[in-house]
Image (spheres, rainbow, N blue to C red):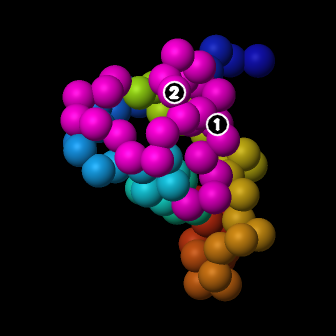
């Protein structure tokens, strides 16, 4: 199994876990991998600017598509 790869993300004031999950994974409910990859970051409603997060690069099979609208499910499944 290959080592997990990450994207380095520096937060802007006002960003949230769910918004980052939507940005990187297309699903606001799939923030769990980011939370688990950043155990030293406290769970907070809104981030302050300048927090460095590791965003795991997920394989297509790890991205949950069941909660997406139908037009997003087709696009996610075809990648």
- Within the image, what quadrant is residue 51 found in? top left
Q: Residue at x 58, y 76 (%)?
A: 72
Instruction: Give the class, few, some or many, for how many residues have Cα within 10 Å of label 2's Cα (few <14, many ≥20).
Output: few
Residue under label 2, please give it: 42
Residue 68 visible in the current orientation: yes
Q: Residue at x 23, y 28 (%)?
A: 50
77 or 56, which is in the foreground?
56
> What is the distance, in whole Å, between disc 1 and disc 2 at their CAs?
14 Å
Q: Which mark is residue 33?
A: 1
Q: Which region is colored magenta?
A: 28-52
Left/right of residue 3 with respect to residue 19 in the rendered view: right
In the picture shown, does residue 9 fall above or below 71? above
Q: Secondary structure at mark 2?
A: loop
Left/right of residue 55 with respect to residue 37 in the rendered view: left
Image location (x, y in percent) of residue 19: 43, 56
25 or 13, which is in the foreground?
13
- Within the image, what quadrant is residue 67 found in? bottom right
Q: Secondary structure at mark 1?
A: helix
Number of marks: 2
Instruction: Give the class, few, some or many, for how many residues have Cα within 10 Å of label 1's Cα (few <14, many ≥20).
Output: some
Image location (x, y in percent) of residue 35: 59, 33
- Within the image, what quadrant is residue 79 found in? bottom right
Q: Residue at x 72, y 57 (%)?
A: 64
Q: Main secondary structure of the magenta part?
A: loop
Q: Is residue 32 shown in magenta?
A: yes
């Amino acid at each position: 199994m290959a080592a997990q790869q990450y994207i380095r993300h520096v937060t802007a004031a006002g960003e949230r876990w769910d918004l980052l999950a939507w940005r990187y994974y297309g699903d606001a409910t799939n923030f769990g991998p980011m939370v688990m990859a950043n155990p030293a970051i406290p769970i907070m409603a809104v981030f302050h600017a300048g927090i460095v997060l590791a965003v795991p690069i997920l394989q297509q099979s790890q991205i949950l598509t069941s909660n997406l609208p139908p037009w997003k499910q087709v696009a996610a499944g075809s990648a």
